[in-house]
Image (cartoon, rainbow, N blue to C red):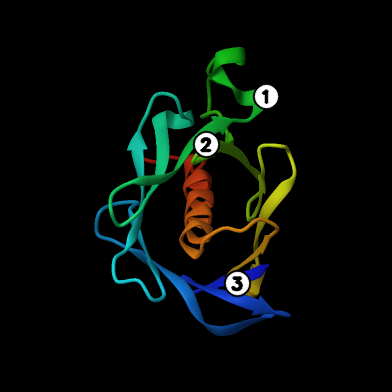
Amino acid sequence: MEYLIRHGELYRRRGQQASGEPLASIHSTLNGPRKEILVAGETQAYRTDVYRDARGAGGHRYELCAPTGRVMALGLPGYAPDDDPAAHGWPVNRMPRAEHLSLQLGAETYLLHQLDNGHYQLNSPDGRQALTVDHRGLSGGWDLACSAAFSPALLCAVLVFCLYLDRENEFLTV
C-alpha cells in the first residue's frame, strides 16, 4: 500500500495525490515532544512520547501508546556503527550519530534505518523491507510505501519516530 502524510494527515495515495478522507492525523501537544494520533472513526487518541532510558542512544526510548495506555510500539535508538561510544569511546568535539531504531512491535523486533535526512527504511525481523518513509522535498509531506499490514496509528507513529531519531542528531546550543 502507498500512503501520503501531508500537513500531519495520513491518506492513501493514488499516483502522486492523496485519495479520499484522512485515515489519521498527527497533532502536537503542549507537552514537549509528545504527539497525539487521532484515527478516523475513533474517539480517543493514541500517544507518542520520548522517555529517559539508558538502553537507547542519547539515553532515550520512544513509545506509542494505545488510548487504553498499553504500549503498542517501543523504539530504542542506536548509534551508527562507526560512532558507537561503547566500541570507539566518546568523540571529543561532537555527539555520536544515532542512525537506527530497534522497534519492538508485540513479539517482533523491526529495524528502522535512517538512510539520510528524509529517507528511512523499516526492515522486518527477517530482514525484508516492510516500509519506506521518504520526504517529498520542496512539495512537502512524506511518502510511505508499505509491504506489511500496519494500522494507520502505527504508520503515523513510525513517521514521528523518524522525526524523533532525526532530532537525536541536532546540534545542541545553550
Give the residue pinned by disc 3: 4
User: In the figure, is residue 3 to the left or right of 29?
Assistant: right
The residue at 72%/37% (across/down) is 126
Residue 58 is drawn in which quadrant? top left
Q: Nearer the viewer, residue 171 or 109?
A: 109
**What amino acid type is highlighted by mark number 3?**
Leu
Which label belongs to residue 161?
none
Mark 3 vs mark 2: which is more N-terminal? 3
Q: Nearer the viewer, residue 164 or 83?
A: 164
Mark 2 vs mark 1: which is more N-terminal? 1
- Which is more foreground, mark 2 or mark 1? 2
**What amino acid type is highlighted by mark number 2?**
Ala
Question: Disc 2 versus disc 1: distance between alpha carbons?
Answer: 29 Å
Give the residue pinned by disc 1: 82
**Does 126 appear above or below 130?**
above
Give the residue pinned by disc 2: 107
Q: Residues within 10 Å of mark 2 (few under 14, many from 20)?
A: few
Q: Residues within 10 Å of mark 1 (few under 14, many from 20)?
A: few
**What amino acid type is highlighted by mark number 1?**
Asp
Residue contact at pointers 3 and 2, CB within 8 angstroms: no
The residue at 66%/25% (across/down) is 81
User: In the figure, is residue 87 to the left or right of 14?
Assistant: left
Q: Helix, strand, or loop for circle 3?
A: strand
The residue at 48%/30% (across/down) is 57
The residue at 63%/30% (across/down) is 80
Question: Disc 3 versus disc 2: distance between alpha carbons?
Answer: 28 Å
**Does 169 appear above or below 6?**
above
